[in-house]
Amino acid sequence: MGVIDRYAELLPVTDKTPRITLGEGSTPLVHLDGISRMLEIELWAKLEGCNPSGSFKDRGMVMAVAKALEDGAKALVCASTGNTSASAAAYAAAAQVPCFVLLPAGKVALGKLAQALMYGAKVIAVRGNFDRALEMAREAAEREGFAIVNSVNPYRLWGQRSGAWEICEALGRAPDWHAIPVGNAGNISAYWAGYKQYKELGKIDKLPRMMGFQAVGAAPLVTGQPCPNPETIATAIRIGNPVSAHLAKEAVAQSSGEFNSVTDEEILAAQYILSSKGGVFAEPASCAPLAGLIKLKKEGRLPRGITAVMILTGNGLKDPDTAMSQVGRPVEIGDSFDELMEVMKG
Ligand code: F0G
């Protein structure tokens, strides 16, 4: 069952909202035993890379596209660091509605680019950063009457609340800490709204602390200032002027949480730890929270024994180039058994 059917009662859907789905949501929440021991906490990972297009964006996109269809939109448009475009293109293909995606030229991970092109979207590489591409997409939407499916579209954030609801259902409560990467700041805001909605409905009694993690080179919410030239290896969160900054700041303030930043080196180290000690391959941006928890542990600021959930927002397969630049090549041998034994025993 997809997000709309599963949560129709909690979402702003009507009889006229088409019940589209690609099977999004209901992603695994996995306890990371080894890394929990290392950090002396109970660490859970929400595997959002298991969504149909490989990222959390599908939860909100299904709602945004359903609502656009309900309103008779003639085309969809978005700007993206990659995942939004892959998701928009997938749902547009399924609904057979035209889709335009604007990407910062040369700064989108290979898998994401391949996805948008394969799903048949009109892919436009803008020589500029994401923030500028988003301004252009918003203007095109306004002038042409296209549906904008970035997280400025309120239905995106509605659908993304479903991640919080699933976590509460799986744990029987909210976590103590909710650790999440922050780029355009929609997802942290959606999770906070989702937790609050569950508390108002009496489904949970306590709210989590919202811990938002950014890359040092693109950390406007940590520095408190827009960042004119964002730069990070975690291209998904290479964003200098987040559109939902106000909502994210509110979430962090209301929950006594905090924003923190981690270096690209810390992100890549965390990505390898997650893969090699956890068996979970997530894209670099998704590893900012783990990098952050490791950093807080070193600083003595990670309370022992807490239950923390990390949102692993995107699948590691989306960015094979970054992964390959971190790891060695396979050992190549001839087709002789002796050589095989030599390598295995070496
Ligand atoms: N993680 C991944 C893998 C993402 O793709 C994004 C955002 C984020 C985290 C941050 O989420 O923007 O809600 O704070 N990607 C957008 C995109 C910007 O275009 O795909 P956010």
Image (cartoon, rainbow, N blue to C red):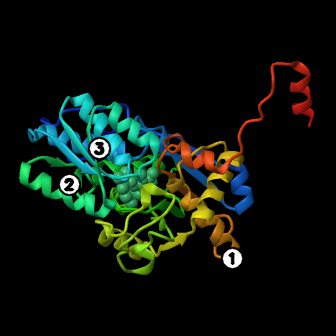
- The location of residue 135, given as percent across then percent down, is 21, 62
Residue positioned 54% across, 61% down in the render: 288
Front position in the image: 15 or 331: 331
Crowding around mark 2 (Cα neighbors within 10 Å: few <14, some 14 to 19, many 20+) is many
Q: From what the image shows, is residue 340 above or below residue 265?
A: above
Location of mark 3 (residue):
61
Location of mark 2 (residue):
137
In the picture provided, is 254 more to the left or to the right than 46?
Answer: left
- Alpha-carbon span between mark 3 and mark 1: 39 Å
Residue positioned 17% across, 57% down in the render: 138
Location of mark 1 (residue):
300
- The location of residue 229, given as percent across then percent down, is 39, 70
Q: From what the image shows, is residue 83 above or below residue 202?
A: above
- Which quarter of the image is occupied by the N terminus? top left
The amino acid type, in three-letter code, at marker 3 is: Met
Quadrant of picture, ligand 1: bottom left
SS assignment at label 2? helix
- Alpha-carbon span between mark 2 and mark 3: 16 Å
Q: Which mark is residue 93?
A: none
Marks 2, 3: nearer the viewer: 2
Crowding around mark 3 (Cα neighbors within 10 Å: few <14, some 14 to 19, many 20+) is many
The amino acid type, in three-letter code, at marker 1 is: Gly
Front position in the image: 299 or 239: 239
Most extreme residue toward the bottom, as rendered? 224
